[in-house]
């Protein structure tokens, strides 16, 4: 299996190559633990009922929906009989190189993992996915054609972001400090969990950074940093066979005790117990 794309998943997904893969969805399906560490997973449900869990949050599967999983996220699903749709798995490298202008790459876009699709747009998406399916069936498929069709699908996804989502994204983009803060967290949350560290890199005071994030996002800078650490801890505890000590070290903690207290104080549960749930 190609670990660049899948850590836990279906064996047939080992066929992924050229940074893009297509799979039809048909009928009942269940997977309790799936993680694509370096890939985006785009699912278009034409018809569906069931539950899709993304980073430990449950979302109901419905007809005419787009579900988006981002690199590193944990997800599981239980899709009932009669489902029909399409799944694209795209490498992070492909998305960042070919789809860099998409709203999907916004630092806040993973707040919107499920998008409801109007019927008219659903028909357009079905048409494009059908073309991808037809091309992908050929072992000698044209990667340029697949890339072009994928760009069209992403342009539709951009259109589908609701007005409230669009406003939130635009508000954040108007403040480059918030955007840069998110990017710095992604790069440094295992190294530093102190607001002062990020404020210094952004050339602002810790207090000012807290004011900006509170006014823009409704949470403090420290809460954003800690929530990212907690999320990664959950992903590694559930999505890998590493020991708790190894997970703690990966996240910048030098003892199991300090890691356990950190997680307990922010989630109400110790890492060892969370892994067993």
Image: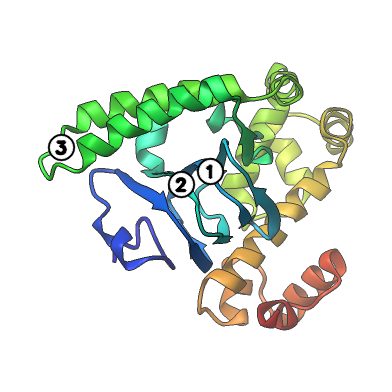
Q: Disc 1 on helix, strand or loop? A: strand
Q: Taking 112 as reference, is 228 above or below it?
A: below
Residue for badge 2: 84
Answer with mark 3 or mark 2, whichever residue precedes in sequence.
2
The mark closer to the camera, 3 or 2, is 2
Q: Depth check: give the residue in front, 17 or 48.
A: 48
Q: Secondary structure at mark 3?
A: loop
- Residue farthest to the front, as pictured: 82
Query: Where is residue 94 shown, x and y percent of the image?
Result: 35, 36
CB of mark 2 within 8 Å of CB of mark 1? Answer: yes
The label number, if any, that marks residue 141 in the structure image? 3
Question: Mark on residue 47?
Answer: 1
Residue in the image at 55% along x and 31% along y: 104
Secondary structure beneath dot 2 equals strand
Rendering coords of residue 105 (x, y %): 53, 32
Give the quarter of the figure containing the C terminus: bottom right
């Amino acid at each position: 299996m190609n670990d660049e794309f899948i850590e836990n998943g279906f064996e047939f997904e080992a066929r992924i190559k050229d940074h893009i893969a297509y799979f039809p969805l048909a009928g009942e399906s269940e997977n309790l633990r799936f993680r694509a560490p370096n890939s985006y997973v785009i699912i278009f449900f034409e018809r569906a009922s069931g539950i899709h869990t993304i980073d430990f949050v449950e979302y109901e599967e419905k007809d005419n929906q787009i579900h988006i999983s981002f690199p590193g996220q944990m997800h599981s699903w239980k899709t009932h009989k009669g489902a029909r749709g399409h799944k694209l798995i795209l490498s992070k490298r492909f998305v960042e190189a070919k789809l860099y202008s998409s709203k999907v790459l916004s630092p806040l876009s993973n707040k919107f993992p499920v998008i409801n699709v109007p019927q008219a747009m659903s028909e357009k998406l079905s048409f494009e996915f059908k073309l991808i399916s037809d091309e992908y069936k050929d072992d000698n498929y044209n990667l340029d054609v697949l890339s072009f069709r994928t760009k069209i699908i992403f342009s539709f996804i951009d259109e589908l972001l609701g007005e409230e989502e669009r406003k939130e994204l635009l508000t954040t983009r108007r403040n480059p400090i918030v955007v840069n803060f998110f990017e710095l967290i992604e790069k440094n949350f295992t190294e530093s969990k102190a607001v002062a560290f990020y404020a210094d890199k952004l050339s602002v005071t810790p207090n000012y950074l807290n004011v900006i994030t509170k006014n823009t996002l409704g949470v403090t800078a420290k809460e954003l940093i800690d929530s990212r650490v907690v999320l990664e801890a959950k992903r590694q505890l559930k999505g890998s066979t590493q020991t708790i000590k190894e997970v703690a070290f990966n996240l910048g903690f030098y003892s199991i005790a300090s890691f356990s207290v950190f997680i307990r104080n922010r989630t109400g549960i110790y890492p060892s117990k969370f892994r067993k749930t």
